[in-house]
């Protein structure tokens, strides 16, 4: 297994094409805009080597019997599913931000099980190929992005009906040694600081969309793979100041990018679905279930740090004993622990797939994520309520350091007399970075937008069964009592 330092060194050896603010980036690892995301991902390596986290962050490979980082492991029990959630909470508590590596982990698990089933039905050899990639990922401890969301163009139209065929990733040419693909994937977490991308279809496909039912792996610096890094709220602070960043080490969210595939060649050994459109939905649902299972883990870890910051700030401001503040902090804990309950429950209710791997219960995983879209906003709202308007109006670090006005900032930013103003400013900035702008949007749309969860919940709800329960209780269909 790699350390965080070795992970950084391995990234320095790669040459991905990355753009940010109109500039081509030479080294992602050494640029301040990307450093927090690299740091957060690096922690998934360092914590695996720390004895106190070994049980959560490592596992035994079912392929080689070797000890591997859990982010490269295929779940083979309920215990694996539960440990994943606990691992995510433990890391989220340390980073207070997204650490990105889970997306590829979920992709690995989804593709592992679906390729097995495609091969059984179609006589293909995707699973064997995928196992070779998996062995490499495990032995080299690679960080893989999970690239699912296409730009989608006109939402009324299916992939093959779009005027621009590239709004969904698709095969443009089949060759004897591989395929050529074009298109793009959007909002891809950790894309620029991954070693490679696992690309999956984004939705159910019909026969006419067969060219869009494609799943493959590409190293991050493959020719024709172009990364355009997304803007985040207050992102220029990363290059301008220290204190005002808030979460200086780990940033605000995962660091998402638009990945363009401009006629990219993929050898057959890295192709894991090519035209088997009837398996596209299954792959989407397995990946979505795995990633939605996570959100009561990582977000609860973040919420732990967020609640801690709010509580500490209330103490610094002298409001911590006010009954309404205590009540609101209890409410924040209640909301966070509800999310954790959801993630643990969908893990415990998980089951084995034909390939022998395990997945979480899809209905409960979707409920988990749908709750995240509400509870994290409510937790943030309560943090804003307790913090006060100063969250939006605090003077800058530069003014605090200014020889003329700095003393006024220091004097008037102080809360209780015993605590320096700097403590209050640091906590305010941390809360700002964790609850304002991009950070919240990730809770809404990461792992799929709320409507995507509602669709899967409806599919799994078994409303007819519920109706039959009611009809039995109401004795519908039995001998009529009243005859008109
Ligand atoms: Fe992992 Fe959470 Fe980030 Fe998704 S949002 S990649 S589950 S830390
Ligand atoms: Fe996410």
Image: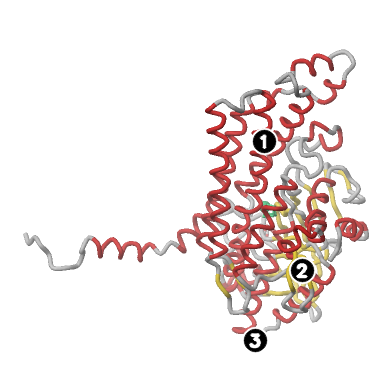
Task: Indicate yes or no: mark 2 CB to ligand 1 under 8 Å.
Answer: no
Answer yes or no: disc 1 within 8 Å of ligand 1.
Answer: no
- Kindly identify the residue that appears in the image at 76 percent across and 78 percent down: 65
Residue beneath label 2, please?
A: 217
Residue furthest left as drawn = 484
User: Which is in the foreground here, disc 1 or disc 3?
Assistant: 1
Q: Which mark is residue 221?
A: none
Residue 416 occupies quadrant: top right
- Name the disc covering residue 123, or none: 3
- Residue 239, quarter of picture: top right
Split into 4 quadrants, where in the image is the N terminus?
bottom right
- Towards the viewer: 214 or 375: 375
Q: Residue at x 88, y 44 (%)?
A: 23
Query: On the image, numbered disc 1 is attached to which residue?
Result: 436
- Quarter-wise, where is residue 342 in the image? bottom right
Q: Regarding mark 3 in the picture, which secondary structure is present there? A: loop
Which secondary structure, mark 1? loop
């Amino acid at each position: 297994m790699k350390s965080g330092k070795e992970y950084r060194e391995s990234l320095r050896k790669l040459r991905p094409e990355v753009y940010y603010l109109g500039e081509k980036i030479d080294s992602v690892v050494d640029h301040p805009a990307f450093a927090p995301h690299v740091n957060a991902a690096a922690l998934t390596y360092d914590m695996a080597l720390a004895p106190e986290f070994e049980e959560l962050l490592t596992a035994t490979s079912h392929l080689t019997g070797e000890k591997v980082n859990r982010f490269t492991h295929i779940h083979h029990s309920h215990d694996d599913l539960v440990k994943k959630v606990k691992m995510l909470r433990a890391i989220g508590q340390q980073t207070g931000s997204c650490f990105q590596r889970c997306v590829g982990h979920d992709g690995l698990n989804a593709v592992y099980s679906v390729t097995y089933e495609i091969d059984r039905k179609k006589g293909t050899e995707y699973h064997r190929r995928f196992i070779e990639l998996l062995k490499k990922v495990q032995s080299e401890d690679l960080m893989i992005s999970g690239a699912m969301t296409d730009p989608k163009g006109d939402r009324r139209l299916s992939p093959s009906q779009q005027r621009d065929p590239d709004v969904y990733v698709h095969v443009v040419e089949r060759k004897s040694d591989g395929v050529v693909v074009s298109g793009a994937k959007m909002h891809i977490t950790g894309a620029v600081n991954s070693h490679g991308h696992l690309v999956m279809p984004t939705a159910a496909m019909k026969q006419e969309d067969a060219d869009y039912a494609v799943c493959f792996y590409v190293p991050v610096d493959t020719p024709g793979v172009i990364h355009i890094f997304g803007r985040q709220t207050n992102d220029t602070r990363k290059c301008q100041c220290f204190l005002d960043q808030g979460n200086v080490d780990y940033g605000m969210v995962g660091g998402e990018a638009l990945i363009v595939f401009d006629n990219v060649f993929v050898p057959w050994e890295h192709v894991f679905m090519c035209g088997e459109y009837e398996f596209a939905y299954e792959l989407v649902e397995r990946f979505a279930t795995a990633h939605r299972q996570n959100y009561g883990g990582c977000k609860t870890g973040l919420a732990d740090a967020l609640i801690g910051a709010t509580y500490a700030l209330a103490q610094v401001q002298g409001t911590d004993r006010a009954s309404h503040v205590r009540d609101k902090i209890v409410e924040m804990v209640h909301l966070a622990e509800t999310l954790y309950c959801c993630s643990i429950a969908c893990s415990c209710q998980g089951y084995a797939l034909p390939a022998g791997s395990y997945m979480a219960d899809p209905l409960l995983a979707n409920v988990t994520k749908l709750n995240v879209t509400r509870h994290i906003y409510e937790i943030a709202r309560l943090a804003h309520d307790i913090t006060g308007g100063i969250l939006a109006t605090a003077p800058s670090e530069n003014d605090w350091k200014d020889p003329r006005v700095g003393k006024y900032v220091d004097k008037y930013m102080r809360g209780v007399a015993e605590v320096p103003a700097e403590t209050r400013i640091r906590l305010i900035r941390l809360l700002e970075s964790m609850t304002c702008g991009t950070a919240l949007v990730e809770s809404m749309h990461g792992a799929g937008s709320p409507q995507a969860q509602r669709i899967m919940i409806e599919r799994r709800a078994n409303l007819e069964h519920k109706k039959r329960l009611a009809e039995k209780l109401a004795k519908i269909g039995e001998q009529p009592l009243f005859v008109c």
